[in-house]
Amino acid sequence: MIKIDQISKGFDNDVVPVKNLSAEIRKGDVISLIGPSGTGKSTLLRCINMLDPPTSGDIYFEGQKITEKGYDVTALRRKVGMVFQSFNLFHHLTSIENIMIPQVVLLKKTRQEAYDRGMELLEQVGLGEKALQYPAQLSGGQKQRVAIARALAMDPQVLLLDEPTSALDPTMVDEVNAVIRKLASSGITIMIVTHDMAFARDISTRVFYMDEGIVYEEGSPEEIFENPQKPNTIQFIKKISSLEVDICSRDYDFEGLRKTAYELMGRMKLFGAFYQNAVLLLDEVIHQILFPRLSDPFRIHLKLIGRKDGVTLCFEYSGKQEDLVSLIRENAALSLIEVDQDERLAISCRIICGYAEAMNYTRQEGELGNLLEIVVRGES
């Protein structure tokens, strides 16, 4: 449906967010654009919609070169709708008027036809009762749903969404995402810039990881989020799916740690009582198992790694192996399973009985020397 051939986009301040980028978008694709800020994701969408025509290179829509001089850009925008992160509603118009005006001006519909279609779309996004209200009377989530309805009123073949939930309060994100999920299942071609990795993984047929001004790596959600191949992608996925902290004091801010851990779980869509228990396990292990054994000074290096099917908690700490072996045998919360010849201990954890698959102690060479790893999987 869309072919992008070696496009670049530069601005007057010598910033070039898109550099020799090529990609193909097929009919019915739901493509999430992810990656660090400033890597050209929003610029790419604006190039496709010709809001910011590329400096060089070509874009083809259904075989026609839309970057060619004289191409009817207005005709393009009837087929390629855009939803902005800042809504871009006309504040002096009601919700229904915001949806009617583009239909009357661009599609040459009568006001009655535009009104009927507008009300149909407002009902679809759950805002039929807000038709006569002005944007100032709507919440952020409601404004964005009106903006989506306005884009859909043009009956586009492609819908471009530029961080549609980034300006919203977290409580409003779900209502907008629900509308986008419904659209994604309707067969319309969608490209969405998002920092919500769980949402991207759920709705996408393909994921574009953008870096260095190009589509650095693309693939299915499983390929990008679970088995990325290129160095920058690997580092990005690691960064958004893991948490590492150093604990050097018994007065450590565990409330802050919990909050950060929950944010990680939100990105990885690891909500629910099971995962809350996994975070509480941090306190259990550190406060009840490690702290009593460690003398000052000490350092605990904590890793929390979110995975699709669970969470892995790793603790590297200072201390003697003999102390930990003794601690494991003495602690009522832990039961020893086996000790192999490599001095590797595999233990089950009763602190969150039924949730922990394994807890392992390994002796390693290095500054700290010991690793306690808790692998938490499953949802029952």
Image (cartoon, helix red, strand yellow):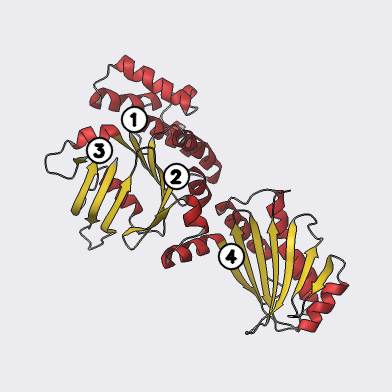
- Residue behind mark 1: 92
Q: Mark 3: which secondary structure?
A: loop
Q: What's the amino acid at mark 4?
A: Leu
Q: What's the amino acid at mark 3?
A: Glu
Label for residue 62? 3
Q: What's the amino acid at mark 2?
A: Thr
Indicate whether 276 appears above or below 72: below
- Residue behind mark 4: 243
For the residues carrying marks 2 and 4, which lies nearer the camera in this image?
A: 2
Q: Answer with mark 4 or mark 3, whichever residue precedes in sequence.
A: 3
Q: CA distance from mark 1 to mark 4?
A: 46 Å
Indicate whether 209 appears above or below 155: below
For the residues carrying marks 3 and 1, which lies nearer the camera in this image?
A: 3
Q: Answer with mark 2 or mark 3, whichever residue precedes in sequence.
A: 3
Q: CA distance from mark 2 to mark 4?
A: 28 Å
For the residues carrying marks 1 and 4, which lies nearer the camera in this image?
A: 4
- Residue behind mark 2: 205
